[in-house]
Amino acid sequence: MEPRQRRPLRIAEVFLLVLALGGGIGGFAMVGLSIRGELPDQFWFRSMLLAVTALVAHVVLRLRAPWADQVILPAVVLLNGIGLSMIWRLEISDATGMAPADAAGNMQATLLGAIVAFALLWVLKDHRWLRRYTYTAMVVGLLLIALPLIPGVGQEINGARIWINVGGFSLQPAEFAKIAFAVFFAGYLVTNRDTLALAGPKVFGLQLPRLRDLGPILLVWAASLAVLVLQRDLGTSLLFFGLFVAMLYQATARSSWIVLGLTLFGAGALTAARLFPHVGARIDVWLHPFDASQYERDPGGSYQLVQGQFSMANGGLFGTGWGEGRPFQIPYAFSDFIYAALGEELGLTGLTAIVLLYLLVVQRGLKSALSVRDGFGKLLAGGLAFAMALQVFVVIGGITRIIPLTGLTLPFMAQGGSSLLANWIVIALLLRISDSARRPSDLPVRGQVSAGAPAAEPEPILVGSSGSDGGTPADVTPPAGSNLPRRRVTDRDPHGSPGDAAPTEHIGTDVPPEHRGGERS
């Protein structure tokens, strides 16, 4: 009888999904009861859609990735539900500037993202298949970030040219480019990390790689600076460059990459602030938001940032409650500043819980990176998890004035179809890698005695290696009842070569332990 691992029932995921759905649907109901005194329109229909999406995702995981992490999906469902509740709350406020808020459209984008993500999870049985397309991913990523620069295709909104118009819908290609670049970096670095870490000169104590090894990575670095200069998007540029530096550090374990990366990006940002007015204006708004000249300037002033600060201050520790605040006074509260809107109605406690949910998803992604057995999976999971963490930091840091404001959106919460679709794909890849990381290995442990051998003739332990004729490899214990020749150490031919067809040694159980070779347990 061959022992088999029992497939997990994923009971913990079911329990957490129930809690996550309760949080999202409960917020949706509280908004309607607070503002209109009744449940929202289509409350049961939208709640059922969200519940069916979570149920289908759970079934797909149970069938195709039973060993995947059981916390990631519930955390994402809860974030998505809270975001939908706030967007709908802003939509029914009928305030000036909230007309673009569209909870139904964001719900459709959520469903589309979940369908694409779990279709990918169903089809992609092994994440290592993506390694075949390392350089294809690089080309795709470069094409995606170049699309907004094409006349007639790209759109400029609020001074940033990072959108394209496809069939009447606006898409942000950079959201998908980060996935392509993560695949490229993982495939390239897993092949060249030893060369990047060891070869090359030392300059001021920093180990620098050879130029020919760094060529493809320099190309992506130049592309990230082009995003900053030509598309006027500091956030996307920071996201690409941070992903680039983080995965280099992950592959080489050299802190010099972090120092070099931060130095290069800081120098580039300061130069851009002096040469390009739109970059300098973002920094002035960040440093002096309450100056009258900055507050009253239109466009590009600090009015949005200051309103977000006032809104979060009004929320206090526990918030005003769903539907009881005035977050609609913040421009673009349903997209760029949804975190500040949530801060007014959920308070500091709610904002802390949201950050902890993001940290939980990132931590689970990094844990999968540590546990998975192949180098490509380690780099890909680590890169995707770090990209999500950096995007959350860039958005929340801009709203809370830790760093200048950017054009990025908060994953799973802010209104935006491109962000939802891209981040659901990221979650699908993390779940696939976590399934590989947690799945029990089918390979036997070296030196392990196979079970099921007759008592009269115990199964020997294979020590040597087979020859080139395709025999049993050295790290595989021959199964019980095999016809491999049985030879003692004392019977070994002293003139034999390591390439003999038969295994070099078999150790019988009647040989004293002190005369046996190999490892001892």
Image (tube, helix red, strand yellow):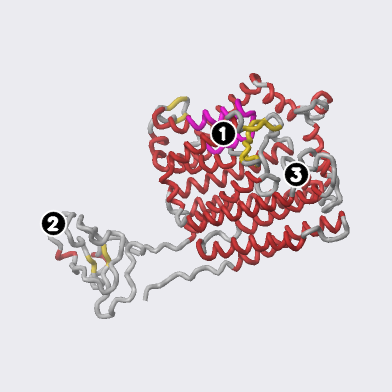
Q: List the residue tagged with mark 1.
A: 147
- Image point 59% across, 55% down: which residue? 115
- Image point 80% across, 58% down: which residue? 41
Disc 3 to disc 2, C-alpha distance = 76 Å
Q: Quadrant of the C terminus?
A: bottom left
Look at the image and tell me whether residue 297 can be seen.
Answer: yes
Q: Amino acid at mark 2?
A: Gly
Q: List the residue tagged with mark 3.
A: 334
Earlier in the chain: of badge 3 and badge 2, it is 3
Question: Percent x, y for residue 261?
Answer: 54, 31
Earlier in the chain: of badge 2 and badge 1, it is 1
Q: Determine the secondary structure under disc 2.
A: loop
Q: How many marks?
A: 3
Residue 496 is marked as 2
Q: Amino acid at mark 1?
A: Leu
Earlier in the chain: of badge 1 and badge 3, it is 1
Query: Closer to us: mark 3 or mark 2?
Result: 3
Question: Percent x, y for residue 240?
Answer: 56, 36
Task: Give, as a single range, the part of the protein colored magenta.
Answer: 219-244
